[in-house]
Image: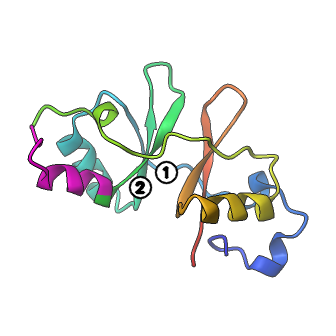
Amino acid sequence: MLQNYPQADCSGKAVGDVMSSPGPQVGDDMIVDVALSVLIGARAHHLLVRDEDGRCTGLITRSQMTAHHQGSWYTEETRLRDLSYDRGPFTSPVMSAHDAERAMRQRALRASPVIDEDGHALGVIVLTA
């Protein structure tokens, strides 16, 4: 089910009708430790990552950043762009909510950025179960 939206109510709805606000967004050049602090400070479950032009390059979670800290490759200068995280394909606001939910389940995603035709984040669609 999509967050805050019962499955029965999703029929006929587009992603743009059921998405949440995009939440915190950071640049892909941000150092992982700083991004982790932003995420914790915002009490968020994920951050949207943007390139230098403001286009969404993906969504990264606390567990993905924490895994970096535990790896032998850890360095204090590692940038978000150097980590593995979901980089698409992303969800369109005109896609049906039902199709978006199915696609996210197939890719084992809990959240997916919703982007416009220029690649800018409009929101996030999140699964609850």
Residue 19 in the figure: left or right of residue 57: right
Residue at 62% in and 71% down: 3
Residue 14, by quadrant, is bottom right
Q: Nearer the viewer, mark 1 or mark 2?
A: 2
Residue at 50% in and 39% down: 87
Q: Position of residue 42 (x, y in %)?
A: 34, 56
Given residues 126 and 74, the one toward you in this image is 74
Given residues 107 and 114, the one toward you in this image is 107
Residue 23 shows which numbered tag?
1
- Can you say whether 43 is above or below 4 in the image? above
Q: How is the image coloured?
A: rainbow
Residue named by callout 2:
46
Residue 34 in the figure: left or right of residue 7: left
Task: Work out whether mark 1 precedes mark 2 in sequence or the reverse, and give the earlier one.
Answer: 1
Q: Quadrant of the C terminus?
A: bottom right
69 falls in the magenta region: yes
Q: Quadrant of the N terminus?
A: bottom right
Q: Amino acid at mark 2?
A: His
Residue at 8% in and 47% down: 72
Residue furthest to the top in view is 53
Residue furthest to the right in view is 12
Q: Position of residue 98 (x, y in %)?
A: 79, 65
Q: Amino acid at mark 1?
A: Gly
Q: Are marks 1 and 2 in contact (CB under 8 Å)?
A: yes
Numbered disc 1: secondary structure: loop
Numbered disc 2: secondary structure: strand
Q: Position of residue 120 (x, y in %)?
A: 60, 32
Residue at 57% in and 58% down: 107
Q: Which residues are magenta?
A: 64-75
Q: Position of residue 30 (x, y in %)?
A: 27, 32
Q: CA distance from mark 1 to mark 2?
A: 8 Å
